[in-house]
């Protein structure tokens, strides 16, 4: 699920006015591209066996090889949520993603190129490198290279088969974006302990977008459209 806290209650421990946009067919659209399209570029599938919500309400995204092509997946929330606290939980081994695979949690306004599409990202990615010592990043666009620009911050998560949960926060307000990632699963009105913090970063300045027609999106895709180095299908789970 993705939880939105309205901008007047932007504290993680304040849940009085929290609302939810659950992952179900009425709330989201699924991207389909039978030709190579961005990001990547890649093919994108909307098949039920490639992207689905299970009986527990968890959203599954996959990358699969079919008919000689690798198909990625992307889900787009229909509603534009604007300022607030976005809370996204995952239950999978994001630390073991293939170096050519990126898992993105982000805002995007396709009609706003002049403000870098209002893009704010949490990305689990190694950008095709086996040498990068980190496997995730926070970004407020524009950012051409990370690490290397002032609009991003890299960090590392380490999970186990017994402990796969991550809870991610994007706290977007006027002139500021704050990112936090914690190990574990937490209720919307629960403040994670400081000891569980995996990464955090705050960004201020003129590059912080104002709300427009952006939508929150989840995608699983291949860097430059390259096949996974391990040659295997991939799956992530958003709970």
Image (cartoon, rainbow, N blue to C red):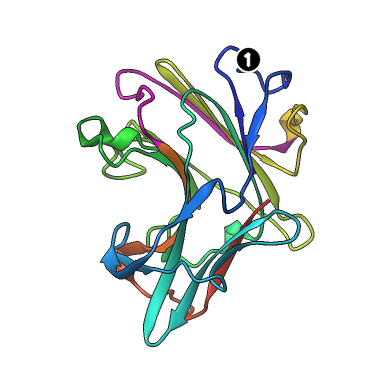
* Residue at the image position 68 percent from the left and 55 percent from the top: 58
Residue 54 placed where, x, y %?
A: 69, 62
- Identify the image quadrant of the N terminus: top right
- Image quarter for residue 107? top left
The residue that mark 1 highlights is: 9
> Toward the viewer: 138 or 111?
111
- Image quarter for residue 203? top left
Q: Secondary structure at mark 1?
A: loop
- Count of numbered tags: 1
Q: Is residue 192 above or below residue 27?
A: above
> Toward the viewer: 29 or 91?
29
* Residue at the image position 46 percent from the left and 66 percent from the top: 46
> Toward the viewer: 110 or 123?
110
Residue 94 placed where, x, y %?
A: 59, 57
Residue 22 placed where, x, y %?
A: 64, 44
Q: Which residues are magenta?
A: 196-214
* Residue at the image position 25 percent from the left and 38 percent from the top: 111
């Amino acid at each position: 699920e993705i939880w939105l806290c309205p901008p007047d209650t932007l504290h993680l421990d304040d849940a009085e006015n929290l609302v939810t946009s659950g992952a179900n067919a009425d709330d989201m659209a699924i991207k389909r591209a039978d030709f190579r399209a961005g990001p990547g570029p890649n093919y994108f599938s909307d098949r039920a066996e490639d992207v689905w919500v299970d009986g527990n309400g968890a959203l599954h995204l996959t990358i699969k090889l079919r008919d000689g092509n690798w198909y990625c997946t992307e889900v787009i929330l229909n509603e534009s949520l604007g300022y607030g606290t976005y809370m996204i939980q995952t239950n999978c081994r994001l630390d073991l993603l293939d170096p050519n695979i990126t898992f993105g949690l982000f805002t995007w306004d396709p009609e706003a190129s002049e403000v870098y599409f209002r893009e704010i990202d949490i990305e689990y990615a190694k950008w095709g490198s086996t040498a990068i010592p980190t496997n995730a990043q926070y970004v407020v666009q524009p950012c051409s290279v990370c690490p290397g620009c002032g609009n991003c911050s890299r960090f590392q998560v380490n999970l186990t088969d017994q402990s796969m949960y991550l809870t991610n926060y994007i706290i977007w307000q006027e002139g500021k974006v704050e990112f936090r990632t914690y190990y574990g699963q937490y209720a919307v009105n629960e403040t994670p302990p400081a000891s569980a913090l995996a990464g955090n970063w705050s960004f201020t300045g003129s590059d912080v977008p104002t709300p427009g027609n952006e939508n929150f999106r989840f995608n699983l895709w291949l860097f430059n459209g390259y096949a996974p180095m391990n040659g295997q299908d991939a799956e992530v789970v958003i709970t």
